[in-house]
Amino acid sequence: MAQLSFLKVLDAGMKALALAKFGPALGISNLANDVVFFPKDVALRTIAEKRGAAEIEFISVWREGMALDWARQRSPVARRGFYLNYVDENSKSAIVNVKAVPVTLDYNIWVWSRTLDKIMQACETYVFWQHLDPNLSLLYNNVYPLAFDLHFGQIVDESTASMQFEKGLYFVSRMPVRIDGWVFTLTTEGTILKVILQLFYNENLSTATPANSQLLATITTDQYGTIITDPEVE
């Protein structure tokens, strides 16, 4: 099975976050039917095909760009990555190292409605959102919590008010969001759970091998050198 890119996870997280923030103002709540991940130029047709009707109240999201964040490239996480603890006995014998690359991700969120007041409520939500320690929260590997800082910009009106007699009247506001994100990749290494030390005796060192030597004792220690079983003396 192909591995899902972490960028796609971030895109899905931004869709869900946009619905959670602006859905109440628009009166929508269904992620599958009320949010599309497409640029504005094709979002209206895409939502109509998805719903089977020309209904305007919806949200569209699109990632406009991505760039390596050089300001965070020298951080310890970017330089060395980090290690994950094992979560059960089956994963205890593996060391999982996560390599991380810092990136900035620029998204645009468009809120659509035929009612101007709904758009105004969404704009107010966007402004207040900036005062609430905004971040995108995800679980990595279904265990480890991540929180990515969000940054905001200027709300832009992209409604058809000036062209309502040619295109019809609906209201659209674009709200930019930048994520201080990371792109991850996993590497798995084996780990030492125990060390077995065997002591042999042979007077002829030049030809000594375990096969032709006398086994004197077997000692088992953990990965830190602590003896976990008493020596077995032969």
Image (cartoon, rainbow, N blue to C red):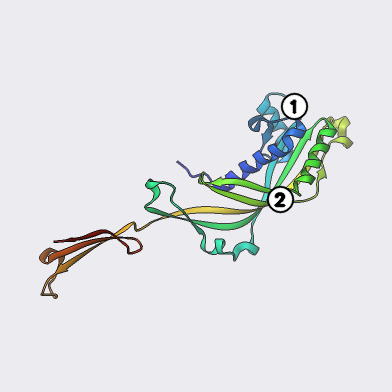
Q: Secondary structure at mark 2?
A: loop
Q: Position of residue 94 (x, y in %)?
A: 39, 53
Q: Is 162 or 188 nearer to us in this picture?
A: 188
- What is the count of numbered marks? 2
| Residue marked by disc 1 | 55
Q: Does residue 82 appear to the left or right of 88 in the view shown?
A: right
Q: Is 55 or 129 nearer to us in this picture?
A: 129
Q: Does residue 145 appear to the left or right of 171 in the view shown?
A: left
| Residue marked by disc 2 | 133
Three-letter residue code for mark 1: Glu
Q: Position of residue 92 (x, y in %)?
A: 38, 51
Q: Secondary structure at mark 1?
A: loop
- Crowding at mark 1 (Cα within 10 Å: few <14, some 14-19, many 20+): some
Q: Residue furthest top?
A: 53
- Crowding at mark 2 (Cα within 10 Å: few <14, some 14-19, many 20+): few
Sequence-first disc among 2 and 1:
1
Residue at figure coordinates x 69%, y 37% from the top left: 20
Tags 2 and 1 touching, CB below 8 Å: no
Residue at figure coordinates x 15%, y 65% from the top left: 216
The CA span between labels 2 and 1 is 33 Å
Q: Quadrant of the N terminus?
A: top left
Q: Quadrant of the C terminus?
A: bottom left
Residue at figure coordinates x 51%, y 46% from the top left: 143
Q: Is residue 113 above or below residue 193?
A: above
Residue 200: name its quadrant: bottom left
Residue at figure coordinates x 38%, y 47% from the top left: 89
The label nearer to you, 2 versus 1, is: 2
Q: Does residue 86 appear to the left or right of 193 in the view shown?
A: right
Q: Is 69 or 23 nearer to us in this picture?
A: 23
Q: Position of residue 64 (x, y in %)?
A: 69, 48
Three-letter residue code for mark 2: Asp
Q: Position of residue 16 (x, y in %)?
A: 65, 39
